[in-house]
Image: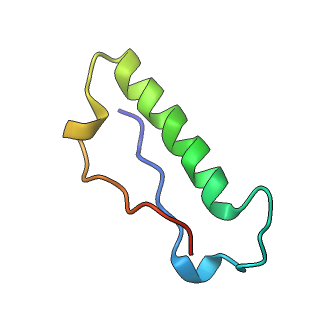
Amino acid sequence: MPRRPERPDDEMCCKRGCDPCIFDYYERALDRWEAKVRALGLDPATLNPSPVSGRG
């Protein structure tokens, strides 16, 4: 089972409007993780609590 990526702490964002932001990288990693989990025939929503959404 692939390990779910950890959401960065809000303090890790420099809040300068970077593109991509550290949270963009996290969202991409989360998308890849969800695709891998689905490929295994599982539902990602049932494995871990929903991530906190939004940027810092």
Whole-percent x and y of residue 47?
23, 41
Depth check: give the residue in front, 13 or 4.
13
- Residue 21 vs 40, above or below: the answer is below
Relative horizontal placement of residue 41, taking residue 29 as reference (left or right): left
Whole-percent x and y of residue 12?
62, 78
- Residue 54 vs 37, above or below: the answer is below
Relative horizontal placement of residue 56, taking residue 44 as reference (left or right): right
Q: Quadrant of the C terminus?
A: bottom right
Depth check: give the residue in front, 49 or 53.
53
Question: At 70% across and 79% down in the image, what residue appears?
Answer: 15
Q: How many marks?
A: 0
Whole-percent x and y of residue 31?
51, 36
Whole-percent x and y of residue 23?
61, 60
Q: Quadrant of the N terminus?
A: top left
Question: At 42% across and 33% down in the image, what residue appears?
Answer: 34
- Residue 53 vs 28, above or below: the answer is below
The colour scheme of the drawn protein is rainbow
Q: Quadrant of residue 11?
A: bottom right
Question: At 66% across and 76% down in the image, what residue appears?
Answer: 13
Q: Quadrant of residue 21?
A: bottom right
- Residue 20 vs 54, above or below: the answer is above
Of all residues, the one furthest to the bottom in this rendering is 11
Of all residues, the one furthest to the left in this rendering is 46
Relative horizontal placement of residue 40, taking residue 21 as reference (left or right): left
Depth check: give the residue in front, 56 or 31.
56
Question: At 41% across and 36% down in the image, what residue appears?
Answer: 2
